[in-house]
């Protein structure tokens, strides 16, 4: 009887101690995780949750304030993506505002994901519980992981394509395969031409180093090169001055280029002059008029020449003509003198 009582007492004491430890542990965990505190919920729409699971942590600027409560498709079909419902402590709801942003992040390559929410600015209104927090693309390590996944995918595709190319080359398929397995005369001729071209380029470089040829002249005779450059500069300045004169409406060419009415008038006048010259030359060619007769009638020419010979052979005319010329010259000078004196 006493032995049985002692045994039951020990079992009861053990159960009592285990219960106390269990209750203390529950309250300790609850106080640490704030399980028994008041919570508020917010919603976030992510295009891709990237391995996020229910129960993962929710951080406010890196401080754990709650966890992921639900992950589901949005009830509204017009909202593409995945809806994540987060549960956070009620005492931080004043820090979540309309300009707060949510993103999915990870602390390391193997760590679980978490939702990071940024603290809103004081000037922005407080976001009511149950509202949607604006989601942004992941940054930091998560963005690197996404980029690395894309790069690895591209590398896989590149490796597959490279393997196909190598297989075709080894089987003698394609241009490169034919060149490596069955070299033809055209390919050999191309190689010979490339070798000949390389030799010519080498010879050109050697000639240039020794001052031969136009290139060598430019590289060695610096005095003439500088003189050529100066001449080009002078020619450039002259062309610049000419262009400025052409742009100036005060010059003849400038006015013709910049004043369409004046240019048209000058063009018409030149056309009339050319027509007149054409008529004159036509009359000369047909022997019309005095000049036409002089050009086309030999008798007129010989008659004038005979008259000149006759004047030279007549003593009176040889005396009279110079005297008449001197008298006329004296009269002309007297008239010019009177003209200058007239106010």
Image (cartoon, rainbow, N blue to C red):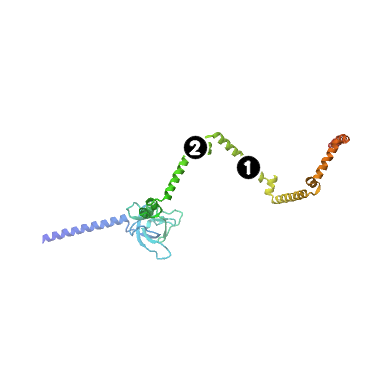
What crowding class fits label 2: few (fewer than 14 Cα within 10 Å), some (14-19), or many (20 or more)? some
How far apart marks 1 and 2 lie (CA) works out to 35 Å
Residue 240 placement: quadrant:
top right
Q: Nearer the viewer, mark 1 or mark 2?
A: 2
What crowding class fits label 1: few (fewer than 14 Cα within 10 Å), some (14-19), or many (20 or more)? few
Residue visible at 82% across and 42% down in the picture: 304
**Residue 205: which disc?**
none
Give residue 114's position: percent from left, percent from top: 35, 55
Residue visible at 54% across and 34% down in the picture: 222
Residue visible at 38% across and 50% down in the picture: 180
Residue 341 visible here = no
- Vertical relation: 310 (above or below) 152: above
Residue visible at 44% across and 44% down in the picture: 195
Secondary structure type for disc 2: helix
Q: Nearer the viewer, residue 96 or 183?
A: 183
Residue 289 visible here = yes
**Residue 207: which disc?**
2
In the rendered structure, the answer to whether residue 225 lies left or right of residue 64 reads right
Give residue 23's position: percent from left, percent from top: 25, 58
Q: Nearer the viewer, residue 331 or 70?
A: 331
Give residue 49's position: percent from left, percent from top: 37, 58
Q: Tell me whether the residue at label 1 lies in contact with that at label 2, contact meaning CB atoms closer than 8 angstroms.
A: no
Quick one: label 1 or label 2, which is nearer the N terminus? 2
Q: Residue furthest right?
A: 316
- Vertical relation: 290 (above or below) 21: above
Please state, as top left, top right, bottom left or bottom right, where the N terminus lies in the image.
bottom left
Please state, as top left, top right, bottom left or bottom right, where the C terminus lies in the image.
top right
Residue named by callout 1: 239
């Amino acid at each position: 009887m006493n032995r049985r009582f002692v045994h039951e007492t020990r079992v009861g004491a053990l159960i009592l101690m285990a219960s106390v430890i269990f209750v203390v542990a529950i309250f300790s965990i609850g106080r640490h995780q704030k399980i028994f505190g008041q919570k508020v919920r917010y919603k976030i729409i992510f295009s891709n949750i990237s391995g996020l699971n229910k129960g993962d942590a929710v951080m406010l600027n890196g401080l754990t304030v709650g966890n992921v409560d639900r992950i589901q498709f949005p009830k509204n079909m017009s909202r593409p993506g995945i809806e994540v419902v987060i549960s956070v402590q009620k005492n931080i709801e004043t820090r979540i505002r309309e300009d707060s942003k949510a993103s999915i992040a990870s602390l390391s390559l193997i760590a679980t994901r978490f939702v990071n929410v940024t603290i809103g600015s004081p000037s922005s209104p407080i976001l009511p519980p149950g509202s949607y927090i604006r989601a942004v693309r992941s940054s930091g390590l998560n963005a690197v992981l996404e980029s690395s996944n894309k790069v690895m995918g591209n590398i896989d595709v590149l490796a597959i394509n490279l393997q196909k190319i190598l297989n075709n080359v080894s089987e003698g398929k394609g241009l490169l395969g034919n060149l490596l397995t069955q070299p033809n005369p055209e390919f050999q001729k191309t190689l010979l031409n490339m070798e000949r071209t390389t030799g010519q380029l080498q010879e050109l470089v050697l000639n240039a180093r020794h001052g031969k040829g136009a290139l060598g002249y430019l590289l060695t005779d610096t005095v003439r090169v500088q003189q050529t450059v100066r001449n080009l500069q002078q020619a450039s300045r002259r062309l610049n001055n000419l262009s400025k004169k052409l742009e100036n409406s005060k010059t003849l060419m400038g006015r013709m280029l910049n004043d369409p009415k004046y240019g048209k008038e000058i063009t018409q006048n030149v056309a009339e002059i050319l027509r007149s010259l054409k008529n004159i030359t036509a009359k000369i060619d047909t022997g019309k008029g005095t000049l036409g007769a002089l050009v086309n009638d030999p008798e007129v020419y010989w008659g004038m020449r005979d008259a000149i010979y006759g004047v030279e052979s007549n003593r009176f005319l040889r005396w009279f003509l110079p005297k008449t010329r001197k008298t006329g010259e004296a009269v002309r000078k007297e008239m010019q003198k009177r003209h200058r004196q007239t106010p």
